[in-house]
Amino acid sequence: MREIERGARIVIEDWVRIKPWDRLLIVTSKEYRAEAAELKKWAVKRARSVNTLFVENKGRYVGVFFDENEEVFDPYTAVIAATEYSLVTTKAAKRAISRHKKFLSLPLSTNNGKSMLEFEFLRMDTKKSRLMAEVIMKYLRHSSRIHVTTPAGTDLQMGKKGRNPGFFNGVVKDGKGYSSASIEVYVPIEETRTDGIMMLDGSLGYIGKAEEITRIEFRQGRIVKIEETPTGIRLKNYMEAYRDSRIYIGGEFGIGLNSYSRCAGNCYIEDESAYGTFHIGLGRNLALGGMQNAKGHFDLVCLEPDIYADNRQLMQEGKIILPEPNVY
């Protein structure tokens, strides 16, 4: 079996778990015809019907259509958003999720010419990831503050009062009806209560690896200063192109749980899901349980964090240290 076929089978059979009564919609663009065709090939063996919606690939702006047409998923029982950028934070996704449809965000963006469906990280044991997530969420759920530091010099404080954690591992059932290809615990942090310094040493989401450590300052929830390294200049230019001041607001704190992933800048989803990393999601966080709308959402990834929920340490240099089942 080819790698792309194996990836498509995992998505249809193991993650979305398409049933005979499902009416599936695959959302994609012409750039990802091959991936959409493989997904459809596996889905038609199981679903009542399979339709494909091709949308114009507008990169970071693809979500605008799904904010303006939030009813687009209404006729379907299951949706796979196989677009370049994630749709999980759009209004259409939020509506589909609230109506108990299966929804999988499957952003296919890569930086090395390889199909995302060919990446090894898709093979992570989903049961193991669920165990890991439950350990961490147990303590995050009852905390009001998150503190994170890294060997590179990150020192961030975040508020999460009234915000519940969740997790993604691809399996829509585990995510209570929706999920992302990223295997992570996430928290829709308070939008005005992130303060401190991030020393960015992992990746810049969709635009690849941080080539040198770059200092980013947060104050009252938003980025106020980015060091002008080559990496910092790339990030500044990327963010300015959104033409939306809300893209500078930290709306998500995430912890990667995928031991098959490597944060190498080759694939956005692989980077943010890598075990031993944390990320701050910038911009829109509506579907995650937050209150922030924006023209987009992307993540900044850092390595080897020490993570504290209130005063309890959850991770040390990227490894879970709680007295729970040893999953590694």
Image (tube, rainbow, N blue to C red):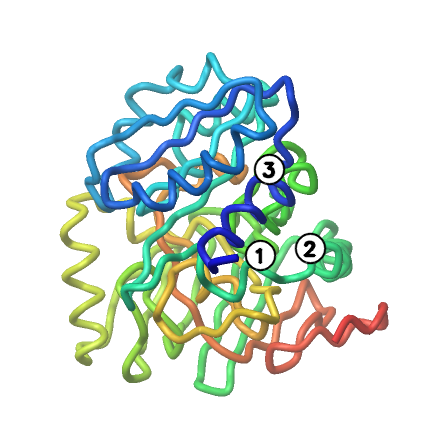
Q: Secondary structure at mark 1?
A: loop
Please name the amino acid that badge 3 sits on.
Answer: Val
What residue do we see at 51% from left, 81% from top?
150
Question: Does 41 sit above or below residue 269?
Answer: above
Corner quadrant of residue 113: bottom left
What residue do we see at 35% from left, 53% from top?
298
Q: Is residue 145 left or right of residue 217?
A: right
Corner quadrant of residue 102: top right
> Can you say which quadrant of the picture contains the C terminus?
bottom right
Task: Give the x, y percent position of residue 163.
Answer: 60, 43
What residue do we see at 60% from left, 77% from top?
318
CA separation in Å, label 2 and label 1: 8 Å
What residue do we see at 60% from left, 82% from top?
317
CA separation in Å, label 2 and label 3: 12 Å
- Which mark's residue is nearer the viewer, 1 or 3? 3
Q: Is residue 328 left or right of residue 208?
A: right
Q: Secondary structure at mark 2?
A: helix
Q: Which mark is residue 16?
A: 3
Mark found first going from the N terminus, 2 or 3: 3
Question: Does 70 sit above or below residue 133?
Answer: above
Q: Which residue is mark 1?
A: 183
Front one among 34 and 152: 34
Mark found first going from the N terminus, 2 or 1: 2
Neighbour tally class for label 3: few under 14, some 14-19, many 20 plus, Cα within 10 Å: many
Q: Which residue is mark 2?
A: 126
